[in-house]
Each structure stands twice: as C-alpha cells, then as structure tokens.
Image (spheres, rainbow, N blue to C red):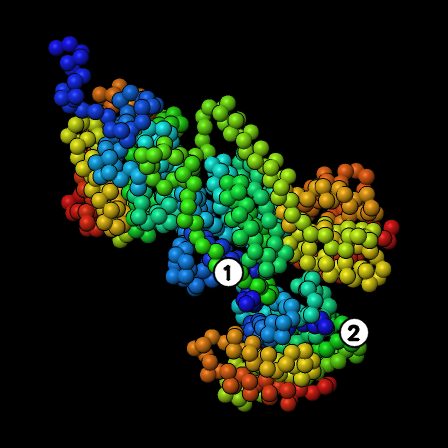
Amino acid sequence: MDIKDIIKPENLVYQKTKLMTDKPLSYCPGCGHGTAHRILMEVIEEMDIQSETIGVAPVGCSVLAYDFMNVDMVGAAHGRAPAVATGIKRCWPEKFVYTYQGDGDLAAIGTAETIHAANRGENITVIFINNGIYGMTGGQMAPTTLEGMKTSTSPYGRDLHSMGNPLKMSELLAQLPGVHYVTRQSVHSPRNVRRAKKAIRAAFEVQKANKGFSLVEIVSNCNSGWKLEPVPANEWMEENMFPYYPLGDIKVDGKLIVNQ
Amino acid sequence: MTEEIIIAGFGGQGVLSMGKILAYSGIMQNQEVSWFPSYGPEMRGGTANVTVILSDERISSPILHLYDTAILLNQQSLDKFEQSVKPGGVLLYDNNGITRHPERKDIQVFLVQAADASAKMESTKTFNMVVLGAYLKIKPIVELASVYKGLEKSIPKRYSHLLEPNKKAIEEGQKIVKKV
Amino acid sequence: MKELRLMKGNEAVAEGAIRAGTDGYFGYPITPQSEVMEYLMAEQPEKRTGMVVLQAESEVASINMVYGAASTGKRVMTSSSSPGISLMQEGISYCAGAELPCLVVNVVRGGPGLGTIQPSQADYFQSVKGGGHGDYRLIVLAPASVQEMFDFVFLGYDLAFKYRNPILILSDGLIGQMMEKVELCEQRPRNTVFDPSWTLTGKTPDRERNIITSLDLDASQQEKHNQHLQEKYRKAEAEEVRYEELQTEDADYLFVAYGSSARICQKAIQLGREKGIKIGLLRPITLWPFPKKPLAAIAPRLKGILSVEQSAGQMIEDVKLSVGCGIRVEHYGRMGGMIPSPEEVLENFEKLFIKK
C-alpha cells in the first residue's frame, strides 16, 4: 500500500473537526488544552450549532483559544468570562454561549463572577480547565494548587496555614440552586476523552433545554509548570490530583450526586 | 416671573413632596421648573430641604444662596435659612417646637400652625399640604386648579382616596395663615 | 403632541435608555445614581421594548456584561457613580481597545476614595484623560439639565456606533438628583441589523468567524491598531466638538464651566451683569473632544477667563492649553461634594479679576 492508497477517502478513519482552525496549537506538547479544545468543537459540530454559538475566551494559557476555535468568540478580561457570557446570553437567549476558563481565571480573580453567574442560573456552559497551577505566567500557585505542591510562588510547597486550601469550585458551585449540571472529567486517556466529550455534550444539551448553568471541570496536566515530562505528568495527576479532585458527576438534572 | 423657594424641615414632614407638587403645578401652567433636594443618609430622620424654582424663563442655577421665599418647618431649618431670605422676601414658618422665632425685620414673616391644624384633620400626613395652602395664599404663583392637577399626578393611584383630604388641607392652610 | 414629564436626571437617563432602544442595561446600586436601575426595574422595559435589565454582582461584572453584549452589536449601557466607575476602568479600556460601542453614565460624587455622596466634578481627569490603561479616548458628554440627561442617551448611542467606541455621559449628583421638565421623544426601535463584519452573532458559512479582542501579542500589529484608534480620535476631534456660548458677544470676561457648574455660572453671570460686569459663558458639552478652537477664538477679546469646576481645578488645564499664555486664566471651585452658590462664584471672580 503506497501513500496514494492510504489517503483514499474510504480509508479515512479520523479527521480533525472543521471547527478547529488550521493554526498550529500554541500549547506545550503534552498539554491537555488541545484535546479539550477539540472535543468541545466536535460537540458543537455534531450538534450543528456553529452558527448559533458564541464563545468567551479567558486570560491564561487559553487566552488565544479564538485562534483555534472556529466559532465567533470574544476575549474577556481576566476572570470576567461569566459576566461577559451573561451579557451575551441575556441579549441573545436563543444562542449557545460558553466560556472556556482556567483555574486562575475561574477560581481566583473571577470567583465572584463565576458564583453569581451560576447562582443566577445563567443558561451558559462553562468549561473549566483545572491543572492546579498558573501555566501562562510561568508556574505560580493557583487556588487549586494541592497541599505541599511546589510552584514558583510556593517553592517549598503549598502551606495550608499561610496559603489557604485548594479550592473545590465544582463542589462549591454544585450547591447553588441555579446550577443544573456539574461534572468533573479528564482528557489524559482515550477512555477519559470519550467521557469528557459526552459530558460537554450533556452540558450543551442542558443549555439547549434552557435548564440553567452547566459546568464541566476538566482536571488536566501542566507538564511544563509541574516540571515533568508528559507521561509522568499524567501519572502524577492520577496519583495526586484525582484523589483530591475525584472524577465523575457532581450534579445531574439539578440533583447532587451523593457518595462524592 | 421667577420664584426661588427653599423648603426645609424634618425628614418625614413631606418637605420634598410639597416641593414636587409645586413643581408639577408649575409644569401644568407651562412654566420652567427645577427641584433639587438634599439627598442621602441625612434625609433619614434628619433634616431635609429642597430648592424649588418656578420661572417663565429658562432656569439658570438650581442651587441658590438667597431665596424669594423660605418655608421653614423646624428650628434647625429656621436657624440655617433665616438669613438666606432676600430683603423684602417671605419667610413662612410653623411655630410648633420653635423656641427662637424669626427676628429679621427686613422681610415679611408669616406663621402657619400647620402641625396643630393637621392634628385636627383626618390625617396628620396632610401637614405639608396645609403649609402649601398657606404659601399659595401669600404667593399665588400657581392656580389652585394646577395644584390639584399636580396632586393627582404625584399621588399614586392606590392612594387616590387621599386626594380630597389633601385638597381640604390646602384650603385650611389658606384660611389659617397669618402675618406676624 | 409633546410629552412633558417632571423627572429626576437619573430617571431621565433611564427613560431615555428605554426610548433610545437599549437592548441591555447592566448595573449595580450606588448613591447618587441608584434611581437609574430602580426606575428601569419599575418600568419593566422587557414588556415595553424587550430591553433586558440586570442587577449585576458588582460594577466590575456590570461593565463586563456590557462588554459581552456590545460585542454582539447590541445597544447596551451601564451607569454608576465615581467609586463604581473607578472599578469599571479596566472594562472600559477593554471596550475601547476592542472598539465596542457602549454607553457609560457617571453620576459623579465627591472623592477621593469612598468620599461623599454629594455632587462633584472631580472625575474630569479620569473621564477625559484616560481612566483605564492604554492610549484611548472616550467621547465625553456633559449634560447640564435633566433634558440633556435624556437627550444624550440618544446622542451617545449615535456616537458610539459611529465611532465603535465607548461614550461617557459625565453627570453629577446635582443633575442626577434634581427634577426638571423633560420633553420626551418617540420610542426608537431596537437594533435589528447587526454588522456582519464584526458583530458576534454566530459564524455562518458565508463569512469568517468574528473575533472581539483587545489583545495582539505582536507589538507591531498592536501599534497599527493603536494608530487606527488614534485616527478615529482625530476624526472625532474634527467632527464632534459640541459647546454652548451664552452672552459672549460683548463679554469682557468668560466663565468656562460644564454640567451643574455651568448652571451655577449662568446665574453668577446674571448677578455680575446687574453690577455692570460683562461676563459670558462657554459651556463645553463635549469634554472630550474639548472645544479648543471656539475658546481660542473668543480669548483675544477677553480680559480674563475663570474656569469654574467642582474640583481642585482639572478642566482648567484644557482651558489653558486652548488659549495659550496671552490671557490670564484662573480657577474657582469647591471640593468634596460642596456646591458653590452663584453669589460665591461671582464674589471670587471679583476678588481675582476686579478688585486687584
């Protein structure tokens, strides 16, 4: 079989969604952002809602998300994505509106906007990438940084007494009546990618059914910030992040899932 | 014609709404009007005052230092604004709770015992309308018909039963006002 | 038939917002401008025009809601008072950088810090010289009456969409809280057409995706964007200067004052003329762009200029820049929420210019 046979359409087993642009991703090799972007765009393609979707990019590693996502997008100020999304959704209730935010954006500087958009039951979808660190600015401590975890601003490890506790935003938000769907996923293995994509689809279906706030947290790696190679970074994530940020549904159909 | 008025008293005496009804009445007669209140926490239980201007011409400053008329309804207001009446101008006051009465000789001082009068009426809340009636007796700058129209405009529909008592209060004020 | 109402300045802004076809208002309570949202909520404009009114969790959220809605081409606005406007500065800078049309109303109170709730004009520098970070300008409209509070909402939107730029209505507690007669105009329809060249309404097959951002990491591109913004501002300077002259024809002296101070000065001028002192008034209606040329044109005929502001003297810098060194320019003002009376303005003018 030479190359001409291989590229025949009938041999095609996978292709990049047209909702991802051709621009090469600017993320570090091994980073989960690329996969998260792709499955989000695949969901929008599969639902055939590109022409009805407006996305909000954050400040953080995914500040340039609009370079890669082929939908109408606006770049928000740091932490303000849920407010920006609220403004859009209130004026265009029939459109699909999502934010894509990291842990610094959503859980530190933008906590007020996040909680209040959730509490108002804004009918938007939030994709929350939690890697426990500030990636873009060079590996500083995030609100989600684990106890004892070394970052450039906690070089001796996060000390809970002086630096506070890692914040479980999803569990916190799930308590609010306006929140309809909260789940925590990862994208570090094919099985988890499939689950995460299903979760994103479920979140957009919540929005389609006008049921309120939906949030998909994706616990992800930051091999650069964690100073690990991609494979060990994923192993470290399984061993350390998942026990504190367990994967699975937290709130479905407006009901808290017990035994979390 | 331009009439520059300050109305001052306790919060709750209806100082601001009296000014508002005057302003409404001016609009009914196609006059230019302005109404500027003291606002904020000082209004809650403290003193309240409002500057009202009615004029046939475009109104310049809504803030004044001297007034054609001062309607002063407690001691603090009397102490603060007696000197702000233009020479030859009008000072109207209620002597209820007043220990130091107006002293100026170069202005016309009028008394209206509105607190007493309104206590005898259906509702003490008509106090400010007794005062308004008194003022309009001294300076009939707007017609009573316009005032009644203004009242209708400014009283919410659910309180429309208060229209008559307020009219009566205005009439009462016209009767009992006297020059000091 | 004319529709006349007795309204507070803040209420006039709110009614103007509905009638100007606003799609969304996002705000947060603060004295002395809370009547704007109170009026809107009571009016239920969603029933009148479909307009959205939302009480946000903060001024920061308010301006970012405005930013989001404006990026879709909707007619949107917010209002606040000084401390709240300070909180919004980041968002306003983003709106200017991303070239989003929107309306911000500042009913100024005394500062600095939490200051007071009484009227002030001490936010002039913040309004006309920047406020937020970066090289940007807002077109700043200064209403001097309740009627103008109403009218400038319409004018504000026209300018906002003409220039794709945030517009600031710089009012103060006096204009916001006072009541005057307002002539209301007909309802203007809400936007139904959205410019496909930039608005976010969902990417359709017939066009590329639209992106609203103020970010460009390539400095040379960012410089080009800045040059584009500056061209826009030069055009506004050429076309949008608005001002009013009163009794300047025979004036020996000139007051320069905007907003509530201009009203106070009108009376001071009248008192001065009764004494035989010929004073005129130039009232800037746009504080940016500032009426430099009209001021420069009158200056040679004058013996002196008094800039009257409820501040320590901010606008006076623009007055001086406009008229050069050939004429004496002085400032008179009160601070921290104190309002000067017309008599006080005249007395201080006389001290400075006549009794020497």
Percent from the top left, x then y, of residue C53? 41, 55
Asked if residue A6 lies left or right of residue A36, the reply is: left
Residue pointed to by mark 2: B87
Q: Position of residue C292 (x, y in %)?
A: 70, 41
Foreground mark, 2 or 1? 1
Distance, label 2 to label 1, CA atoms, is: 46 Å
Image vertical order of residue C334 relative to residue A185, above or below: below
Number of numbered callouts drawn? 2
Residue located at (46% from left, 83% from top):
B161
Q: Chain of mark 1?
A: C
Depth order, front residue of B92/B76: B92
Local packing at callout 1 (Cα closer than 10 Å; few below 14, some 14-19, many 20+) is few
In the rendered image, the vertical position of residue B20 relative to residue A115, given as above or below: below
Give SS at disc 1. Answer: loop
Residue at image location 40% in from the left, 54% down from the top: C52
Indicate which disc residue B54 carries: none
Is residue C260 shown left or right of residue C132? right
Where does the C terminus of chain A fall, quadrant-wise? Answer: top left
The residue pinned by badge 1 equals C186
Q: What quarter of the picture does the N terminus of chain A occupy?
A: top left
Expressed as whole percent of the image width and height from the top left, the position of residue A5 reads 15, 14
Tell me where residue C319 appears, x and y as whole percent.
72, 43
| Residue at 60 percent of width and 71 percent of height | B27
Q: Amino acid at mark 1?
A: Glu
* Crowdedness near tag 2: few (<14), some (14–19) or many (≥20) residues, C-alpha within 10 Å: some
| Res C169 seen here | yes
Check disc 2 and give the amino acid type.
Answer: Pro
Considering the numbered disc 2 on the image, is that residue within a helix, a strand or a loop? strand
Q: Is residue A80 visible?
A: no
Q: Residue furthest top?
A: A2
